[in-house]
Structures are given as C-alpha cells and as structure tokens.
Image (cartoon, rainbow, N blue to C red):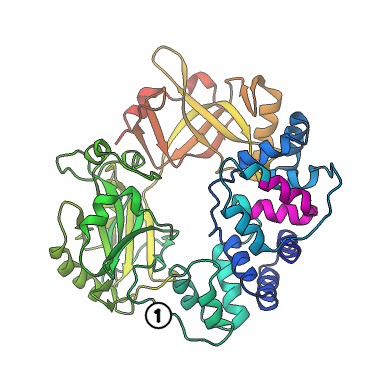
Amino acid sequence: MRQFADLIDTLVYTRSRNAKLDAIAQYLRDTPDPERGWALAALTDSLNFPAVKSATIRSVAESRVDPELLRLSRHYVGDTAETVALIWPDGAPVVRSDASVDEVVGMLANATRATAPAIVAELLDRLDANSRYAMLKLATGGMRIGVSARLAKTAFAQAFAVPIDTVDELWHALAPPYAELFAWAADGGVQPDISATPFFRPFMLSHPFESDTIDLQTYAAEWKWDGIRVQIAHLGGETRIYSRGGDEISAAFPELVAALQIDAVVDGELLVRGDSQGGDAASFNALQQRLGRKTVTKKMLEQYPAFIRLYDVLVDGLEDLRHLPWTIRRARLEALIAQLPASHFDVSPVLDVNDFASLAELRDGARDAAIEGVMLKRRDSPYQAGRKAGEWYKWKRNPLTADCVMMYAQRGNGRRASFYSDYTFGCWSESGDLLPVGKAYSGFTDAELKMLDRFVRDHTLAKFGPVREVEKTLVLEVAFDSVHASKRHKSGLAMRFPRIHRIRTDKPAAEADRIATLMAMVT
C-alpha cells in the first residue's frame, strides 16, 4: 500500500494537472500487475465493497477513540478517512507490516457486514497513517483527491502512448484490474475485441449556448428533455442500460431491457409517462421514483412506466455509425424506430422553425414538465466522445426564481467543512407558517459564503446534531429549473436544481414568497 499511499499523497498536494498526469503515469509504468490495475480502479471509483461503508469506518473508530473526540476531529479535518487515519491509536503492540493493494482489495471484497469491522480494524492496525488513509479511501470509494476518471484515463494513455479515445472505449468493456488493457497498452499485445458486446460507448456532450444567434441551416434544433441521459445497447443477445457516467442501471428498468431485442446501441432520454395510460413525459420528480432501485415492484412498473425518447443511434446491427454525420444517423434512427415498440421508445422531434427568433420564442414559452431547454446540433457532426467545440450546444430555458427565507444550515464537506454552506429555505403558507421548499449549497461566491456562515453563527436558535436552526430573517433569492408537486415534503413541493441566486439583505422576511406562488409554477 505504501506506493499507492505515496501516489495519493502526491495527488492530494499537487494542484498542477500536468503534474498529476505525470505522477499517475509514472506509477502505472513502475508498478506491476495487478497492483496498478486495482489502483487505477480506485482512482476512477470503479471498486465497490458493499460491506464497507462510512458508517462501518466510524463504528470501528469509535471502538478505539472517544466518540465525541472523533466527532469534533471530523468537523475540524473535514474528511472521515483522513480523520480516522490520523487519530487511530497504536493500542496493543502490533507489528507494522505493509499490505499490497491486491491483498487489501481481496480482504475487503470478501468481507461481510459481520466481518467487515474486524477486517478494517486489522488493516488499520497493520498500516502506517498514510497507508491507512489510502486504504480507507479505496474502501469507501469517491476518493475526492482532485482526480477525475477522465484525468486517470488520460494518464494511462500518456503512460503507454496509446489513444485516449480507445482507452475510454475499452475501459467500460473490461473489468478491474484491467489485465487485458495493460497487456495491450503496456506490453504491446493485441487490442481487446469488444465489438460484439453491449459495452458503454462514451456520450457526446454539449457546450452551453452563449451566443446571440445561430444558423439553423447549419444546426438542427430539438428539445432538451428533463430526464436522465441514457444509452441502451443490445448486442450478443444481451441488453444493458447505462447512465451518462457509464454506470449500468439495467436492473431498475427491466421493461426497457426486455423491449430492445434488435442489435443496436441508441442514445436517448429516460423518462416516465405522465399517466399509466400512455400519456406523454412526466416531470423529473416522477422519474425519481424509479431511479437507484435494485428491484422494481409490479405496482411501480404500473404507476411509473418508463420509456426512452431517442436522440441518436450509435450502432445499427453491427455497423458502427458514429463516424457518420448527424443527418445520416438521424435518418437511420427514424428508420430504426419502426422496429421498436412504441410503448417504450419514440424519437425526439426536430423542431420546425425557420429562424432563430422563432426558436427563441418557442424556447421561452416552453414550460412543459419534461422540457429543460433546447439542443442545437451541427448537422454534419460525427458522434464523438466528450465536448467538441462548435458541434453541439445546450440552450437551457431561463430559470425560475423565488424569494425564500433561510431556516436551517449545515456544515459542508471538504474545503467547506469549516463553513455552514448547505442551506434549507422556506416560503410562507396561507396560515402564516414557514415551510421548507428546498435546500441549496451553490450559487454564491466565496465572499458570500463567509457572509452566510457568519449569519448562521450569529443567529442560531437551536442545534440538532450538525444542523443549526437560524432566525427567520434572511431572504435568499433562489433560482431553480422547475418545481413539482411532492407528497414527501410538508410544503407539498420539490424544486429541481435549486441554487442561491442573490442574498436579499434588502428585503424583510415577511415579504418573501408564498407557497401559493410556487404552486402556480408547478408543471
């Protein structure tokens, strides 16, 4: 673990992107298999140990450290793994001995809920502080050390002088510790053949549209639907559904897996019907009822029937179409849709507008529950991974706003661990009660964060664990994409993507918006 821990330490304290790339590349060249493969999987959050959670780490730590001291230390440090790595006592005489990454992965993978605490404690006893930190980060995932999956893949490509786009594609078809990937890139072996498997193809993404006009002869326009972007692939007799990040979500949508029975890979927006009788797309709030589930009940399938509104086709039969212009892929998609069940698939229409002014008017008037804005796609654009300048643009509709009153605040994480940066806010009911309508932790500058933190500390009424209730005097102008009815919240409302737009120190809390005002915005 020491080599891996040294790499983590370097990455944590290195701000330069190039320096991070060099450090990872050097580690990959110098480290043997399968160590480097497991390390790479950890850096890209590709490992999962179900028996080891943050609560497990805290429970183990509390068995050796006073819980209140641990809590205060965690608040000061801002990271559970770092806190436990530093505060873990030497205790009984234990011979310090290093453990390989392969050994650690094996121990954690074989852990059960019953055995995990003892296994974690054993590793903490064996390792030094730096290695403890690396082990805990590896165990719980989401390393948060300033390294994205894309940067790690780029470092791999740089280490062995292979194309990053090829690495990106092979990545999702191969499993850690990526023996075939290293055999090809590092050892000069044959590139793995994955053409007949339903692996994840990286999405083509868009840039925000920030111009005053665009040529609609060059660019096609279509709605940007408010669901989640997915890719569904059927190849080799198997169907898989992937989210934009490459996570497989097939288990949550068995009806869609069953519905695609022709060889194809398509890109679209996952939505649910507005009603069980085949209505159009419902709000994102309805889709959330289906997300993140390992199993789906018959009742849920009936109440929230899912479908995919298709944008693009990447593979038709066994023919890869990504190098072709959008216009040709669009024609192939429109031909392909005839082979798919209309109950589960349709095609996102191209907007019929003659000029940019008409498009702008159409976009501004769109407040449909499932419409987020407009997409602009260059008609001759191939389907390329990532964001390519000048190819695709997203033109989101202007956000809605409401004046709300801060009610509660909670400390943030990471560099915000010392600040109250997560704010719950509310609006007035008809009876004069202030009811929570949302929570936001973005949209403000560093200077505004300090001001808000000071307000929380100076105006605290009560404390509930990490949460502080504050005096109901500060008005926040909150921007949000949409608002939906919700039975889960006392106010009956749920905001979509709320963020702090302005701090209204000029406005009395009594003049903040009413629940009824937000109800009128419900789509």
Residue at left offset 30%, top offset 50%: 253
Q: How many labels does the image show?
A: 1
Inspect this view and state whether residue 510 appears.
Answer: yes
Residue on which disc 1 sits: 193
Camera-side residue of 322 and 460: 322
What quarter of the picture does the N terminus occupy? bottom right
**Residue 482's image quarter?**
top left
Image quarter in which the C terminus is found: top left
Residue 55 colored in magenta in the image = no
Callout 1: few (<14), some (14-19), or many (20+) C-alpha neighbours within 10 Å?
few
Which residues, given as a range, are shown in magenta? 119-138
The residue positioned 70% from the left and 27% from the top of the image is: 457
Name the residue type under label 1: Asp
**509 or 373: nearer the viewer:** 373
Name the spot of residue 479 as percent of width and height, x first. Answer: 46, 39
> Looking at the picture, how far across and down is residue 338, in whole percent?
13, 64
Can you tell which quarter of the image residue 277 is in?
top left
The one nearer the camera, 200 or 126, is: 126
| Relative vertical location of residue 404 with respect to residue 167 in this rendering, above or below | above
Counting from the top left corner in percent of width and height, residue 355 is at: 25, 63
